[in-house]
Amino acid sequence: MRPIITLLTDFGTADGYVAEVKGVLLSRVPDATLVDVTHEIPAQDVEGARLTLARVWRRFPAGTVHLAVVDPGVGSQRRAIAVASDGRFLVGPDNGLLSPSLLMIGARVVELPVPQVASATFHGRDVFAPAAAELAAGTPLEALGPTAADPIVRRTPEPHRLGDGRVMGEVITVDRFGNAITNLVGRRGGVIEIDGRELAVRRTYADVEAGMPLALVGSTGLIEVAVREGSAAVALGLRRGTTVGLRQPA
């Protein structure tokens, strides 16, 4: 199978940054299959990038190299790292972005050297892309650098249960449709309490009329608050960190 390298960045596509990174990759691994996960992560939104990476990294075959760059600390003392985890490789800044892979048992992490000629503002091109290409070409992880101790790990906030039985959580991200994704799991259904509203957990968007708000279990298994054919973020004023409660049937 041809080597697979995915790219996840906040670079956007209006400029040539993504093309420069791809040029480095293809110059070193001409037969690589390059997959754009997204380049539309909001600028410097490490948390949003972490959640996106968590959804996709294990959907790809073993041996895939994930190149993830959302790097507000580029050029600073923050480390550049590469990770081997669950049969896949990940390359990016040591700022918590790669946490989904670091939480797996047996994950191995090395620190990547930063060449003196590397741009202080574009490690995606000059540090991370060359390392990703090396891994895709079969270079062992440990050949890229020394072991990196105590990489930064970010975790999704845990819901907590109140004395009255309600489970309290929060919105952890808002997708491009304006759906507010929470950290609550609702396998048994229930009622969501958010911003003074009560919304029964439905099965699908079609269970309500157009323009009406609802809660449902999304494809991640987490409860989402949505507006059919609209944006819950706009209509209900929801954003990351908004408090959400769940009342479940006895």
Image: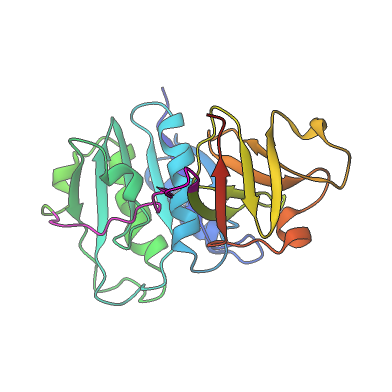
Q: Residue at x 11, y 54 (%)?
A: 146
Relative to 101, say whether 129 is above or below: below
Is residue 176 left or right of 73 when viewed as pictured? right
Classified by dominant secondary structure, the portion drawn in magenta counts as: loop
Please identify the quarter of the rendering in which residue 14 is found: bottom right
Q: How is the image coloured?
A: rainbow
As drawn, which residue projects farthest toward the top? 1
Q: Which residue occupies the foreground of this view, 160 or 35? A: 160
Number of numbered labels in the structure image: 0
Image coords of residue 93 (percent x, y): 33, 61
Please identify the quarter of the rendering in which residue 114 is found: bottom left
Image coords of residue 217 (percent x, y): 61, 34
Relative to 85, say whether 203 is above or below: above
As drawn, which residue projects farthest toward the right? 210
Magenta stretch holds residue 155: yes
Q: Residue at x 12, y 56 (%)?
A: 149
Residue 130 visible within the image? yes
Quarter the N terminus occupies = top left
Q: Which residue occupies the foreground of this view, 20 or 249? A: 249
Is residue 133 left or right of 225 when viewed as pictured? left
Q: Which residues are magenta?
A: 148-167
Q: Residue at x 28, y 55 (%)?
A: 153
